[in-house]
Amino acid sequence: MRGEWWQVLGGTDTGGILVRSGRSLHSEQLADRLSCGALVCEMELVGERLRYEKLTGHGPQQGWISTKLKDKTLVARARGDAGPLQQQPREVRIWAISDIHTDKAENMKWIQDLAPAEFRNDVLILAGDVANTFEVLKESILLLRERFGRVFFCPGNHDLWMQGWKGGDSMDKLHAILDFCKLHDIETTAGVIDTGQKRLLIVPLISWHHPQWDTEPELEEWSNVPTAEKTVADYWATRWPQPLHMEDGSVARALDELNDKRGGFAEAVSRKDEFDAVISFSHFVPQLELVPEKRYLIPACLTKAVGSSYLQERVAMLKPTVHVFGHTHFGYDIDISGTRYVQAALATPQERAFGGSIVALGTFPVLEAKPCKVWDSGHGWPERYRSSWSEYYRRYKRQAHVTSIVPSVCCNFYSPTAASKSGWIAGRMPIWLFGPLPHREYEAQMVLQEVRDSTGKDARDARGASVSHKAPLSARGEPQFVSADEAIRLHSQGEHTFVNVRSDAGTPGLLQIPDSIVLPHPRATESLASLPDDELLLLCEGLNARCGNMIVYGCRQDLKSAWDSAMLLAGYFRIWPTAMTLLEGGLEAWTEKGGELEPM
């Protein structure tokens, strides 16, 4: 019959509590201490001396410990009817972060700037990818251990790269990392968070990616799509003992088996219902639904290097309340089959600067320089964080079978065929515009500045004087012009969205081309990203409602406004300017050719 469970409460300042080989206080003291938070099973209880078998945490697998030291409780019953030893309720917050990449000086400073006093009683979940080298990894983990009451960690792919490592292969490096964590009280196996009122189980899961996890269609309509073996650095940056190979999934299977060999997982599954909540975490991705579809990835083969079916099975067995993951650097907060999945990646400085709305999870990591809070003993679970991909997939159904349409920013990596097309699925808003408001406003300002830099006053005036060929105003090309006659024909086909950017657009009684989207420049074009979420969504879905190009028109005498508007829309929709069309001669030319008009 299984004995009572006990949780270690003492040893927070000493790296754990003393363990002896026998019941006597004079028996041999074992070399390792039993870590704070460790969960043990009672084998024998004699007075205040407990013989245990370790279930989770660091320290000797078996031994004798004291339940009390003078008036201080060292261990307390985690469950039982024999009068549990109670600890005083305390405030605890659980934070999560992944992909801190402290090889980057700016990221290291981000970690160094975390105030130790703010997180002294808190728990940090560190979901992998600390650093490429062992030395920087050790420095970074120790910095975090100094700042947080407890740190749970699982390694990521960068942590196992061979860069600077002379101690064998990547498996040897993994064990060296785990040994270092054990020595410094960084928890890499399951542990209990007990606030005195709530008890949570934290379960780290070691994993690795393998290509067989990806079961979604390939981009068959495109050619020269790179393979994972030729583009993913893990294939040449890591080295594994024979007969393990990344290609056949044997590396992923071997690392997954460590979760059983190191103990704690089976017990966590069997007794998870005894806790108020379970939070598991991994570096890699446990569900395909947590990765954007192939057409959105650069390159598409990344789907074959981010997830694990072995990990997916473990998460399904555990059924955690929350699962934290990392690796892809996309902010995520979404529910799947009763589990809340969260990714809070610090990512690289470049990604935060130029793709912050994709990385962001609410105010993390740019607007508020601290990890992402996933639980608070005083307030429970936080409200859902806004993130681009989560909101995108809440709005639109996943359509992995759509492989012919690839956004402009992605398709440059492949060769087109007659069946392929650059662009977006009609009726959808671009992903980055689903991001938190401050992030999308910041990125919209970058688009605006780029347009101003590439379409200076002299260049715009030159285009206004003539529509003859000029040098491209952008390295990505420039909008195309269409005559009024051709525009009237295209309008009759109903495949193109006409956009009225005249400064007076929207004024009641004025005439415009039928079914136009009203977007006066600069009042509405330059502030588009600042619209309330619902208004922005409806506007962008309208702009992208049809499969043809947007046709932008303004006044004959103000071509520069129409030009700038087209360039801005290209930037907002992440398409090349060549996919934008300008009505030559503006609304006046349309009217002169007898085009149909309607009042606003």
Image (spheres, grey):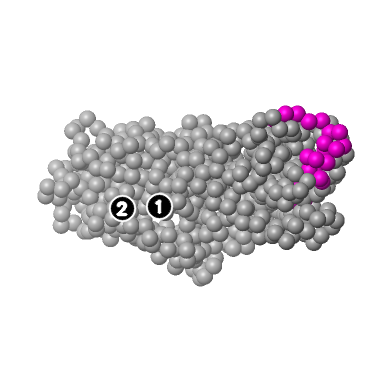
Q: Which mark is residue 235?
A: none
Could you tell me the amino acid type at mark 1?
Lys
Left or right: 60 as drawn, with respect to 420:
left
Q: Secondary structure at mark 2?
A: helix
Task: Report the residue marked by disc 1.
Answer: 370
Residue 536 as seen in the image, left or right of residue 107: right
x, y (%) of residue 222? Answer: 78, 47
Position of residue 381 measured from the top left corner of the image (x, y, whole percent)? 38, 37
Picture quadrant where residue 238 is located? bottom right
Q: Specify whether 580 is left or right of 281.
A: right
In depth, the one of 239 and 91 nearer the eye is 91
The residue shown at (19%, 32%) is 82
Task: Tell me which residue sits at (80%, 40%) in the image.
Answer: 588
Instruction: Residue 118: give its label.
Output: 2
Query: From this viewpoint, which residue is outermost toward the left?
Result: 70
Residue 17 in sight from this viewpoint: yes
Residue extent of the magenta highlight = 573-600
Q: What's the residue type where badge 2 is placed?
A: Glu
User: In the rendered view, does 435 fall on the left or right side of 518?
Assistant: left
Mark 1 surroundings within 10 Å by alpha-carbon count, few (fewer than 14), some (14 through 19), many (20 or more): some
Q: Are marks 2 and 1 in contact (CB under 8 Å)?
A: yes
**Residue 330 in view here:** no
- Does the stretch in magenta take in 338? no
Image location of residue 248, percent across then percent down: 64, 50
Q: Earlier in the sequence, mark 2 or mark 1?
A: 2
In front: 140, or 134?
140
For label 2, count other residues whose C-alpha is less than 10 Å away and answer few (under 14), some (14-19) or many (20+): few
Q: Is residue 231 above or below residue 441?
A: below
Q: CA distance from mark 2 to mark 1?
A: 10 Å
Determine the residue positioned at 75% across, 44% down.
Answer: 555
